[in-house]
Amino acid sequence: MKNIEKYSGFEQGPIRPPSEAMSLLIRVTRNCPWNKCRFCPVYKGAKFSRRPIEHVLKDIDTVAEIIQKLDSLTQGSAITREMVQKAGQNLEEKDYDALYAALNWMSGGRESVFLQDANSLIVKPDDLVIILDRIMAKFPYVKRITSYARSTTIAKISDEDLKRFKDAGLNRIHIGMESGSDNVLKMIEKGADKKTHVIAGQKVKKSGISLSEYVMPGLGGKKYSKEHALETADALNQIIPDFIRVRTLAIPNQTPLFKDLEEKKFEKLTDLECAEELKLFIENLNPMDSNIVSDHVLNLFEDIKGKLSEDKDEMLSKIDKFLSLSDYDKMVYQIGRRTGLFRGVMDMTDKSRYERAAETATKFKMTPENADFVIAELMKRFI
């Protein structure tokens, strides 16, 4: 006899892209069906499952009911504590998270919805269309519905179903390419090769759905750094995604890659080497209508952004400015960047911020020689 899972209330998963910080998070699946990537600390030890579609629809309906109550109470005015209490007074304890999700979403403008967890497009196409239809029926003002997806999953989805998803409201897909090098992809156990990444990316673009591809500078280590940069650029030149999102490698202690690092099977790049790899990568991207986004504290440069067809030279010049700094100023910039004082090298011209970064370096007993070790330990906190 089939075990029927009981609904236990509104659910949210542990991660979402930084660009979805103000999105309503709707959990369609739990965890990751692959869960073998050696650099990833998320979901390890957790079992993958698809949530029953009835539970997902119930989550959507519950948030919609809460928002309707809040709208009737506020009538365009600011939300007060008393209003929140009234909106939640008849909720069961298991649905309190739906109230918090509704409040966060309302504060962000109610423009986008993100489908969790790591690979929501793995559900049956008919089920995904039903979920998308319910979202649009309950929140007709939504401008964007997005999801993570694995290339291996997308490669198996028919063009017709991808078009159905678009027509039902799915208008952005985030794919963790990480690398276009088959050697790197095999080393990190990504479970996809370059050819599959290209096929999947091209399928998404053909469907008319906006595509974000994530790349990870440093992932090839010292052995594959050049190959990683060149092969990843080549894959993206074939795909021409809407967004290329940079996420520099960090290695938390609980990841399999950290064990590789300890056993000297993997040699991590320094920040200087990572900057040189990033420069090589961008140099080899075609001047296409893809936007580079570097919106994460793990990245050495947050201000490297823009359209490759228009801003490529400017992005490269910012990396060159870092490479031309003295060893001491490189160290100051590194700590200032990772503590939020700097977005780019030009911010070092602000005397107050420069002095604070230098003081922070002194506090952490940083020197140009140990800077990368100190930064590596700080970066583990940001995963």
Image (cartoon, rainbow, N blue to C red):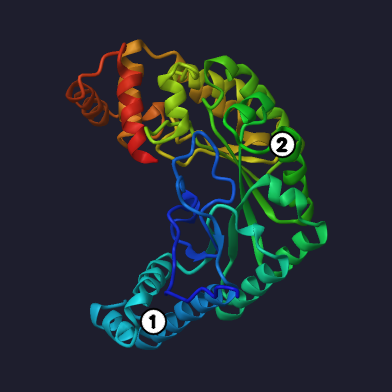
Q: Which residue is mark 2?
A: 288
Secondary structure under the numbered disc 1 in the rendered image: loop
- Mark 2 and mark 1 in contact (Cβ < 8 Å)? no
Please report the residue visible at 81 percent of the width from the left and 57 percent of the height from the top.
159
Identify which residue, 254 or 198, lies in the foreground: 254
Q: Which residue is mark 1?
A: 76
Please report the residue visible at 43 percent of the width from the left and 35 percent of the height from the top.
255
Q: Image check: 231 left or right of 98?
A: right
**Looking at the picture, how far across and down is residue 85, in whole percent?**
27, 82
Q: CA distance from mark 1 to mark 2?
A: 43 Å
Please report the residue visible at 51 percent of the width from the left and 34 percent of the height from the top.
38
In this orientation, does residue 348 appear?
no
Identify which residue, 28 or 232, lies in the foreground: 28
Above or below 243: residue 278: above
**Looking at the picture, how far across and down is residue 71, in whole percent?**
41, 83
- Quadrant where the image shows the C terminus: top left
Q: Amino acid at mark 1?
A: Gly
Please report the residue visible at 66 percent of the width from the left and 67 percent of the height from the top.
128
Snapshot quadrant of residue 213? top right
Q: Image check: 371 left or right of 180?
A: left
Q: Amino acid at mark 2?
A: Met
Secondary structure under the numbered disc 2 in the rendered image: loop
**Looking at the picture, how far across and down is residue 43, in whole percent?**
46, 48
Snapshot quadrant of residue 13? bottom left
